[in-house]
Image: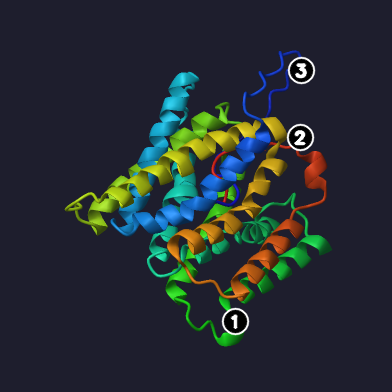
């Protein structure tokens, strides 16, 4: 899904350290794999809700994703954060970056197509730009970024068919998907303000964050759902894949991409997610697609691209490295 969920850490300043070993798989192949995993996440959510309640889908997703990252942390001998303050901030980050948006998307897909959910997810950079202008003093508005925000808003109205009075759309489900996309940048801004320079690796912070998100859902699930009477095969496999791939393996892929090619290039995956989500929903789930959906999605993506500052590309190598789930689902 759209742009990260894990705390930022500064790259090491010791230039005398030996260069990192080159990954066996080219970064372009991993970039495509990450795009496909996050693009298909919306289809997997839809499949999971065919057999389980939305909160159960989210819990299974977080549990599977946490298990993958726990194994990765053991293999890499990562240490958990020791500061109580860090754990407190991670608890808040887990809510805004995992528990809340994952649950909202699961509930949204009870009544809206997975294609629409994927496109709503693509609005996250637009929300992020708007919020950062208010909450982050270093982000200054420019004509280009304001134009991108306006263009993105027009794209959203096009996707929703505003000229038709939003006929045929489930307002509640669509609002939940848009709120989920808003939750990500709220979490990123919180992370930027509270979890930079903790002394822990991004992998350790991300794994801890997902664990806390799992705990949050473990407390919520018994209150709002009952124990499943059966465990249907396809929905169960969908939930496991959603967590292990979309929330576990995908984090490791993005973590490696950020380290190798920088955050700006790695975050370009955001623009491929709605395209893949739409193709998957139409071809595999038989979802209907009217002309305004792909046209509006392209306008949204163009607006999101404009909101990124020109300096971001050249400054990417020197800026803080952010790893973790993007605003992708």
Write the residue at 55% across / 61% down: 278
Q: Secondary structure at mark 3?
A: loop
Q: Is residue 82 visible?
A: no
Q: Residue furthest bottom?
A: 164
State left or right for residue 248 relative to residue 33: left
Are the residues flagged by discs 2 and 1 in contact, CB closer than 8 Å?
A: no
What percent of the width, then of the height, locates residue 20? 67, 19
Label annotation for residue 233: none
Q: In the picture shown, does residue 1 fall above or below 160? A: above
Write the residue at 75% across / 49% down: 138
Residue placed under numbered mark 2 in the picture: 317
Q: Within 10 angstroms of label 3, few (less than 14), some, or many (20 or more) residues?
A: few
Q: Is residue 260 visible?
A: yes
Given residues 10 and 159, the one toward you in this image is 159
Q: Secondary structure at mark 1?
A: helix
Q: Earlier in the sequence, mark 3 or mark 2?
A: 3
Write the residue at 38% across / 62% down: 107
Write the residue at 47% across / 62% down: 114
Residue placed under numbered mark 3 in the picture: 15
- The CA distance from mark 2 to mark 1 is 41 Å
Residue placed under numbered mark 1 in the picture: 162
Q: In the picture shown, does residue 327 fall above or below 303? A: above
Q: Earlier in the sequence, mark 1 or mark 3?
A: 3
State left or right for residue 299 relative to residue 218: right
- The CA distance from mark 3 to mark 2 is 14 Å
Q: In the picture shown, does residue 91 fall above or below 298? A: above
Given residues 22 and 86, the one toward you in this image is 22
What percent of the width, then of the height, locates residue 172? 43, 73
């Amino acid at each position: 899904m759209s742009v990260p969920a894990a705390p930022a850490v500064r790259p090491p300043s010791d230039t005398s350290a030996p260069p990192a070993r080159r990954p066996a798989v080219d970064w372009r192949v991993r970039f495509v794999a990450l795009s496909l995993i996050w693009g298909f996440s919306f289809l997997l959510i839809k499949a999971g809700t065919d057999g389980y309640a939305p909160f159960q889908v989210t819990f299974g997703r977080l549990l599977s994703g946490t298990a993958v990252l726990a194994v990765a942390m053991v293999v890499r001998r990562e240490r958990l954060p020791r500061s109580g303050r860090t754990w407190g901030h991670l608890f808040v980050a887990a809510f805004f970056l995992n528990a809340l948006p994952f649950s909202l998307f699961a509930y949204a897909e009870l009544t809206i197509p997975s294609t629409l959910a994927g496109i709503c997810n693509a609005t996250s950079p637009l929300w992020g730009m708007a919020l950062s202008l208010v909450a982050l003093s270093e982000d200054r508005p420019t004509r280009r970024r304001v134009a991108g925000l306006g263009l993105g808003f027009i794209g959203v109205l096009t996707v929703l068919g505003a000229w038709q009075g939003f006929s045929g759309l489930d307002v509640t489900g669509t609002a939940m998907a848009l709120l989920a996309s808003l939750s990500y940048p709220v979490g990123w801004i919180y992370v930027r303000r509270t979890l930079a320079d903790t002394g822990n690796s991004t992998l350790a912070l991300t794994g801890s964050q997902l664990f806390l998100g799992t705990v949050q859902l473990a407390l919520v699930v018994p209150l709002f759902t009952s124990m499943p009477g059966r465990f249907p095969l396809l929905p169960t496999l969908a939930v496991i894949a959603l967590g292990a791939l979309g929330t576990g393996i995908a984090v490791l892929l993005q973590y490696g991409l950020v380290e190798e090619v920088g955050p700006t290039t790695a975050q370009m995956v955001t623009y491929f997610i709605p395209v893949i989500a739409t193709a998957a929903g139409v071809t595999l789930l038989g979802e209907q697609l009217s002309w305004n959906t792909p046209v509006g999605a392209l306008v949204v993506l163009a607006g999101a691209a404009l909101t990124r500052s020109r300096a971001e590309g050249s400054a990417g190598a020197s800026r803080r490295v952010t790893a973790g789930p993007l605003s992708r689902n």
